[in-house]
Amino acid sequence: MFNAQRGFSLIEIFISLAVGLMLLLGILSIFVGMKTTTVETTSYGELQENGRYAISLLSDDLLRQGFWGDLSGSLDVSGLVSSPLPMTVAGDCIGEGVNNASFPAAIGHFRTLWGKTVNNATLMGCITNAKIGSDVLQLKRAVSSTIALADISSDDYYIISNSNTAGIFAGGTAVPSVNFGQIWEYQQHIYYIREDSQGTNNVPVLVQGRLQNKALVMNLDMVVEGIEYIRFMYGVDTTNNGVVNAFISADNMANSHWDNESDVRILAVKIFVLARNILPDRDYENLNSYQLGDLNIDFIDGDGKGDNYRRLLFSSTITLYNARVDSWP
C-alpha cells in the first residue's frame, strides 16, 4: 500500500519566498554598509596620508630655514667671499622686496623667509597657475648634512662656510677658499597650490619649487596630490624680548617684518594644510567649515548645498630655531 505524497502548498511557497527575500535583503544591507564603510575608511586614510606628508615636508624646511652651515648670524653679501649674482637663474622665483632672489644682493636685507596670500595666479616671475586664496611660501637655507668634495654635483648650488665667512658657488665651478670650511647644499624652496586637470576633475596639488643649476631654472614639481589650501601664520616678536607677540597672516604682515632684523623677528610659523579627496563621492555632502588661522573656508553654495569632497584640516606650529642663534653648536 502506497502513501500519497503531497507537495508544498501555495501559502507555504509564499512564506518560504518571503523568508528568503528578507534574508537576502539583510545580507545585501550588510554588504552595502561594509562597502560604504570601506569607501569612507579608504578616503580618510588617503586624506591622513597626504595631509601628514605635506605637514612633514613644510615643517622640515621651516625648521632649517636660515641655517647656513657653520656661519654665525644672517647671510649677507658683506660676509661672503663669493656668490652668484642675484637673478642669474633663468625663471628665478623672486619674492617681494629689494633683495629676495635666490642669491643675496648688495642692497637691503636678504630675505630668507617670505610669504604671500595669492591674489593673482601669476607671481614671483616663475609661477603662472597659483590657487587664489591659498598661500605661497619662499624660504632659503643650507641642507643640514655636509657634502664631501667628491660628492658635489653640477646640478646644484652649494655654500662653504666657517663661523666667520662663507661662499656660495655652483656645482662644477671652483670651490671658494674658506679656511676650515665645510660644504652644504644651498637651497631656495617655493611652496604653493595649483590645480591639475585629471579627466573632467580638477585635482589640487602642493607644488615645490627647487633651485637647480643644471636646468638653469627653478623646477616646479608636484609633491603631494589632494592638498587644497596651505596657509601660514607668522609668529612675530615686535618687542625684542624673544617671545612671540602675535601670529600674523601673510596678507597682514608689514613689509618690514620680512626683513627679520633685530627690532622685529619671526620666531615661529603656524602651518595649516587642508587636504581634499582627489575624487568626489556622490553619496557625501560636505557642509563643514574649516578654520585656517584667521581664515574660515567652506564649500557651500548660495543654495546651502555642499560639494561632494571629504576634507581634513591639519596644523602644526614650528619654532624657527635659527632666528636668534649667534653660533651653531
Image (cartoon, rainbow, N blue to C red):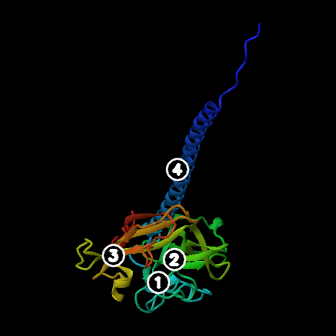
**In the rendered image, which residue does mark 2 sit on?**
192
Q: Quadrant of residue 146?
A: bottom right
Label 2: which secondary element? strand
Q: Which residue is at 27% across, 82% downward?
A: 263
Disc on res. 118 = 1
- For badge 1, the amino acid type reads Val
Residue 53 visible in the shown view: yes
Q: Nearer the viewer, mark 2 or mark 3?
A: 3
Alpha-carbon distance for marks 2 and 3? 19 Å
- Specify which label sits upstream in the sequence, 4 or 1: 4
Q: Position of residue 291 (x, y in %)?
A: 36, 70
Alpha-carbon distance for marks 4 and 1? 37 Å
Label 1: which secondary element? loop
Alpha-carbon distance for marks 1 and 2? 9 Å
- Specify which label sits upstream in the sequence, 1 or 3: 1
- Specify which label sits upstream in the sequence, 2 or 3: 2
Depicted 20 relative to depicted 3: above or below: below
Q: Which residue is at 50% across, 62% downward?
A: 284
C-beta proximity under 8 Å, tags 1 and 2: yes
The residue nearer to you, when weighing 61 against 54, is: 54
In the rendered image, the quadrant that contains the N terminus is top right
**In the rendered image, which residue does mark 4 sit on?**
37
Q: Position of residue 6 (x, y in %)?
A: 70, 21
Q: Nearer the viewer, mark 2 or mark 4?
A: 4
Q: Position of residue 262 (x, y in %)?
A: 30, 81
